[in-house]
């Protein structure tokens, strides 16, 4: 079973995907972080990434992204890397989607990312699209001490490529707790 959760920047999609994966006892893949890792290790040369995966230098273990056995996950959450990945995906979206899928090691999982329900897994069993009003999204990032200028720039880049997947269930997290949003997701499964 493949469950995808897409949505705009800071809508709560990653938190909900992680919570849903735990509730269903499934692995969770954060494709936004995977895209960031691909952008960082490729240094603009996407042809170099598959050999890194095949050699075990770039891998995902227990939800953590490792490069040469160093955990990159926390560093990849920096919005600078998000901006880098968004710019690379703008021109090489099919190649990045292929590489990201190549890194997935399970048949049943929950994944999140802007392109999960469209370019990466268009035939997923369940597709969700998470939205929140702009004020909520920017407040959420401010709580996490993100640079709001970078976030605004990132949102502008994503605006052109962010699509609600076909047959996706749209859920708004505005004014809801994480638990309320999770229960709403679970009600559709």
Image: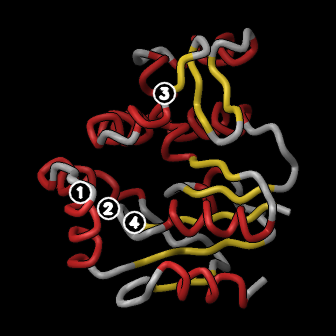
Specify how the rendered protein is coloured: secondary structure
Under circle 1, the secondary element is helix
Circle 4 residue: 8
Q: Nearer the viewer, residue 27 or 172?
A: 27
How many neighbours does mark 1 have within 10 angstroms: few (below 14), some (14-19), or many (20 or more)? few
**CB under 8 Å between callouts 4 and 2?**
no
Circle 2 residue: 159
Placement of 63 over or under 108, stated as above or below: above
Depth-wise, is mark 4 or mark 3 nearer the camera? 3
Horizontal and vertical percent position of residue 78: 31, 39
How many neighbours does mark 2 have within 10 angstroms: few (below 14), some (14-19), or many (20 or more)? few
Circle 3 residue: 72
| Residue 169 as seen in the image, left or right of residue 138 | right
Label 4 vs 2, first from the N-terminus = 4
**CB under 8 Å between callouts 4 and 3?**
no
Under circle 3, the secondary element is loop
**CB under 8 Å between callouts 2 and 1?**
yes
Residue 62 found in image quarter = top right
Label 3 vs 1, first from the N-terminus = 3
> Residue drawn at (84%, 44%), measured in percent from left and top?
106
């Amino acid at each position: 079973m493949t469950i995808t959760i897409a949505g705009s920047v800071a809508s709560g999609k990653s938190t909900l995907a992680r919570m849903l994966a735990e509730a269903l006892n499934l692995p969770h893949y954060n494709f936004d972080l995977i895209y960031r890792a691909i952008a960082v290790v490729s240094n603009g040369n996407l042809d170099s990434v598959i050999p890194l995966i095949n050699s075990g230098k770039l891998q995902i273990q227990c939800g953590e992204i490792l490069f040469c056995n160093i955990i990159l996950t926390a560093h990849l959450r920096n919005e600078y890397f998000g901006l880098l990945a968004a710019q690379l995906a703008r021109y090489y979206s099919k190649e990045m989607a292929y590489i990201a899928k190549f890194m997935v090691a399970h048949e049943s999982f929950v994944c999140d990312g802007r392109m999960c329900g469209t370019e990466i897994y268009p035939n997923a069993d369940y597709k969700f699209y998470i939205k929140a009003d702009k004020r909520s999204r920017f407040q959420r990032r401010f709580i996490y001490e993100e640079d709001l200028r970078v976030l605004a720039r990132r949102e502008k880049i994503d605006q052109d490529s962010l699509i609600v997947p076909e047959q996706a269930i749209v859920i708004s997290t505005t004014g809801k707790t994480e638990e309320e949003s999770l229960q709403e997701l679970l009600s559709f499964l």
